[in-house]
Amino acid sequence: MSPAREPGQTVDAARRALAARFDAANLGSPELDARLLLSAALKVDLTGLIASGTRQLTASEAGTVETFATRRLRGEPVSRILGEKEFWGLRFTLSAETLVPRPDTETVVELALQMLRDGPASGGTTRILDIGTGTGAILLALLSERPEAFGVGTDISEGALATAGQNAAALGFASRAGFVACSYAAALKGPFDLVVSNPPYIRSADIADLAEEVRAHDPLAALDGGADGLDAYRTLIPQAVQLLRDGGALVVEAGYDQSRQIEELMTAARLAVPCPPKADLAGIPRAVGGRKMPR
């Protein structure tokens, strides 16, 4: 019998047993995963989990815990099991058509806010475009910091756009965000003050080497950047230049060794690169920014 199904097991005992199973399977954060999944099964927060430590699991709760454990042991990320992920202090619903927002991508938000502050004032509503919006995480994080802003998110996936719209409504930004189905920004007209994007940038040949949690659960179209990983940038950078107003900024996420090549693509498209790429917590140049200068 699985430890999660032992009759009369307490919440604390179930947590310890779950963490031990995850640890034995060499999962990266067994204790945290156990706490998050057990909290979800019991429908309590982490404080409530601690407070419930000595009570016994019901049969229904034990069954839910075991279902979650089985999915995690098969390599499914905790965020996929829970159906949500925190980003920029905001909670985002996920779907099969969206990437899981990652902490690295917060560097895009940080650099975008910096470039808005350093650029010319918009003189009214700040207009933001998020190309390939997915869950809407980048766009909605920016709207949370810029109450005067209005944003548009594009995506080729109708399912992703539905998820982004759901997140915008849940976070209270529905009146300041719109979502458009198109490839990159093909259906839009400017001008925008800021364009942001986390495009697919994994080299096609490297997809098979990605971690199981990414390769098997994130949508391939949001990962595969072509032979050299730069296909999306070759399309979106020229489109962004056409849509930006003079003084407007483009900020994109980059793969671990792509920032210099992306800067070259920006320069070739007549964008100035006013600052070095912003590094993530691992020191990898992760966000690259360019600014449209007046001719």
Image: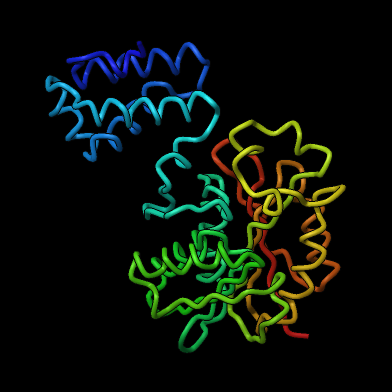
Which of 273 and 226 lies nearest the eye of the viewer? 226
Q: Residue at x 76, y 68 (%)?
A: 237
Q: Position of residue 250 (x, y in %)?
A: 66, 68
Which of 170 and 142 lies nearest the eye of the viewer? 170
Q: Residue at x 29, y 20 (%)?
A: 15
Which of 93 and 64 lies nearest the eye of the viewer? 64
Is 54 located above or below residue 223 in the figure? above
Q: Residue at x 41, y 25 (%)?
A: 69
Image quadrant holding the C terminus, namely bottom right
Q: Position of residue 77 (x, y in %)?
A: 50, 35
Is 289 located above or below residue 61 in the figure? below
Residue 155 placement, left or right of 38 = right
Image quadrant holding the N terminus, namely top left
Is 13 located above or below residue 79 in the figure? above
Residue 161 placement, left or right of 83 = right
Q: Position of residue 194 (x, y in %)?
A: 59, 74
